[in-house]
Amino acid sequence: MADLLVASTGGHLAQLVRLAARIPQLSDDQTWVTFDTPQSRSLLDGRDVRHLPYTGSRAYAKTVRNTWTARSILSRRRYERVISTGAAPALSFLPLARMHGAQPIYIESAARSEGPSVTGRLLSRVPGVRLFTQYEQWADHRWRYAGSVFDSFLPDADGGSGKLERVVVTLGTIGGFGFPRLLERLIELIPPEASVLWQVGSTDARGLPIDAVENVPSRELDAAMRAADLVVAHAGIGSALAALEAGRCPILVPRERAHAEHVDDHQALIAAALDARGLALRRSPDALTRADLRSAARRGVRSSTQPPELAVLSP
């Protein structure tokens, strides 16, 4: 029987792709549902994919409208499970899953180290949804600990080049929120002779002395990170995971709600969690120094040869 995997693009999709590979009982017959973006086309190339209209953070009216698409997809064939890492698409699909004979499974984002997101809290009120957290410290009788997407990585203190010749700066693909504070600080700090890929997303970089690119396909960005001496990123899950898989120890700079850079301050939790594991350096734009750039460039990240299985399908 087939499985249905549902997620927003960005960090939610990046997590689901990586976590699904660690679920041994998952069917090879999979249908994926997400938004149509360069990232999703790259990550899901060759897979069976259905696209939803883009739904931004807390866009509840669009989330409700997407339930009609969810009902149509779930009615076309029988799925054994519907698995999601959020955000809005989880609310469209998981409440309907049991009505169509599928087991709904929600894995909370690794961005949520202190408790569930709004999506998680809403889904916890839906009967029959199996709930999992990636942080053991807040697991309870309702939220079971599943392991973390970060379990696949180990710090390598001397794994970097220590140079600043090739740099990747990525602000992710989040729409509607700029992050010019980070760009302006990095222009001051990165040596002018360095070769820099500036992936700026929706940040308006006009007037800045950089060759900005709005979006870079995942495969191209991954290749650039592998070739880079240093990766500096906003503290989004997708950007962090891409840097770690490329073997880089990124500098993660959280967007802040107070500066209208995101809807909340969850990126500070992501950066803190990875900094505590020795897998990243957490910094704010104002506190970032050239010494930080060189420190991160000297460090690397190793992939675990056998990442632990994700126990979300066991009784």
Image (tube, rainbow, N blue to C red):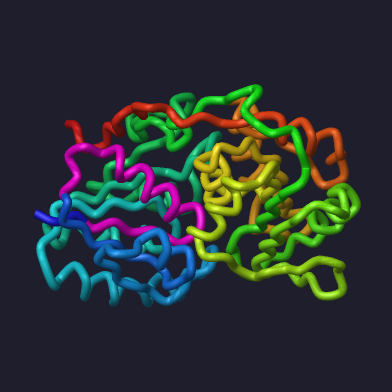
Quarter of the image with the C terminus is top left
Q: Vertically, is 308 above or below 42?
A: above
Residue 268, x across and y down, in percent: 67, 41
Residue 39, x across and y down, in percent: 47, 63
**Which residue is at a point 19% across and 54% down the rendered structure image?**
3
Left or right of residue 215, residue 198 in this image: right
Range of residues picked out in magenta: 4-27
Q: Is residue 197 visible?
A: yes
Count of marks, rendered view: 0
Left or right of residue 209, residue 36 in this image: left
Quarter of the image with the N terminus is bottom left
Residue 55, x across and y down, in percent: 48, 70
Left or right of residue 234, residue 46 in this image: left
**Which residue is at a point 51% across and 29% down the rendered structure image?**
302
253 or 295, which is in the foreground? Answer: 295
Residue 212, x across and y down, in percent: 73, 68
Magenta stretch encompasses residue 6:
yes
20 or 299, which is in the foreground? Answer: 299
Q: Vertically, is 242 above or below 272?
A: below
**Which residue is at a point 29% across and 75% down the rendered structure image?**
69
47 or 196, which is in the foreground? Answer: 196
When asked about the image quadrant of residue 276, the answer is top right
| Direction right: furthest residue | 188
**Which residue is at a point 44% across and 25% down the rendered structure image?**
136
Left or right of residue 282, residue 75 in this image: left
Q: Is residue 273 visible?
A: no
Magenta stretch encompasses residue 21:
yes
311 or 251, which is in the foreground? Answer: 251
